[in-house]
Image (cartoon, grey):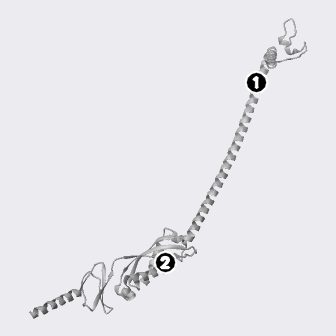
Amino acid sequence: MKKSALLIPALVVVLVAIVSSLFIVDEREKVLVLQFGQIVKVQEEPGLGFKIPMIQEVVRYDDRILSRDLEPLEVTPSDDRRLIVDAFARYRIADVEQFRRAVGAGGEDAAARRLDSILRAETREVLGSVSSNDILSTDRAALMLRIRNSAISEATALGLQVIDVRLKRTDLPPANLEATYERMKAERAREAADERARGAEAAQRIEATAARTVVELVSEATRDARIIEGEADAERNRIFADAFGADPEFFEFYRSMTAYQRSLTPGNSTMVLSPDNEFFNYLKSDTGASATE
């Protein structure tokens, strides 16, 4: 009975010791086995691991690709035009032993803070060597690659592998943004004024051309009309001359009738002529009496 009472606690202790000595490594993590703070074992393959209970401890680190968003960073490019840069990095813990030695018990949070310092410094250095137009352009892959390559060596000392660095957003500081907007508005207003001035100049040029064309057309039409009138008068005079030559007496009669028509208009017409005036020869009677009106 006494042996059974002692055996059960001993079995429990052994079972607890066995369970305490076992640990499971997930495929998404890496594990260090520490003894009194010193690394005694590294297990990166997933599966079952063993440690000495109460003496050794297991420290787990994420083996996946991690992301780190940097706080907005103010940089000064080579043209002294300040910019606010928002970036992020992707990295992973490549060497857990080096990582542990570099950051100690601070773990991933301490490593992330140190990586932030590295990335901020390299971003300032790389972007400070180019103009703001290069940073604001859509083709920034070369700049991001330079930042990543510059950060790799320092991150390696932390046991980290920097996979990628991306510039998410690049803006002007709020103090400069309003001034830039105002400058852009002034530039657009000046361009609009230039366009309006060029349009007004073109309109005046077109109007002047149209007015000159009208004057030329009217002058040509007037000239042609006068030429036609002159030709018509010449033709009329020729006809009259031919008619006068063919029958002078009839021509005299026609001219007298025309003169009568123009002179004796309806209304108050009064003419005072001497009795022997030839104007009314064709209105005289056969007896030779004169007619007056």
Disc 1 vs disc 2: Cβ atoms closer than 8 Å? no
Q: Quadrant of the N terminus?
A: bottom left
- Is 132 displayed left or right of 198 in the figure? left
Q: Nearer the viewer, residue 24 or 207?
A: 24
Q: At numbered mark 2, what does the secondary structure look like: helix, strand or loop?
A: helix
Number of the label disc, if any, that sits on residue 236: 1
Tag nearer the camera, 1 or 2:
2
Q: Residue furthest left?
A: 1
Tell me which residue sits at (69%, 41%) in the image: 214
Q: Could one spot residue 280 in this view of the protein?
A: yes
Q: Nearer the viewer, residue 285 or 102?
A: 102
- Is 216 displayed left or right of 256 in the figure? left
Report x, y in % for residue 292. 86, 12
Tell me which residue sits at (72%, 34%) in the image: 224
- Is 107 displayed left or right of 253 in the figure? left
What's under tag 1, amino acid-wise? Arg
Taking 63 as reference, is 261 above or below it? above
- The residue indicated by pointer 2 is 123
Tell me which residue sits at (57%, 70%) in the image: 176
Tell me which residue sits at (78%, 21%) in the image: 240
Rate crowding at label 2 as few (under 14), some (14 to 19) or many (20 or more) other CA atoms within 10 Å: many
Taking 78 as reference, is 204 above or below it? above
Taking 124 as reference, is 191 above or below it? above
Q: Earlier in the sequence, mark 1 or mark 2?
A: 2
Numbered circles on residues, count: 2
Report x, y in % for residue 107. 37, 84
Q: At numbered mark 1, what does the secondary structure look like: helix, strand or loop?
A: helix
Taking 188 as reference, is 280 above or below it? above
Report x, y in % for residue 173. 54, 72
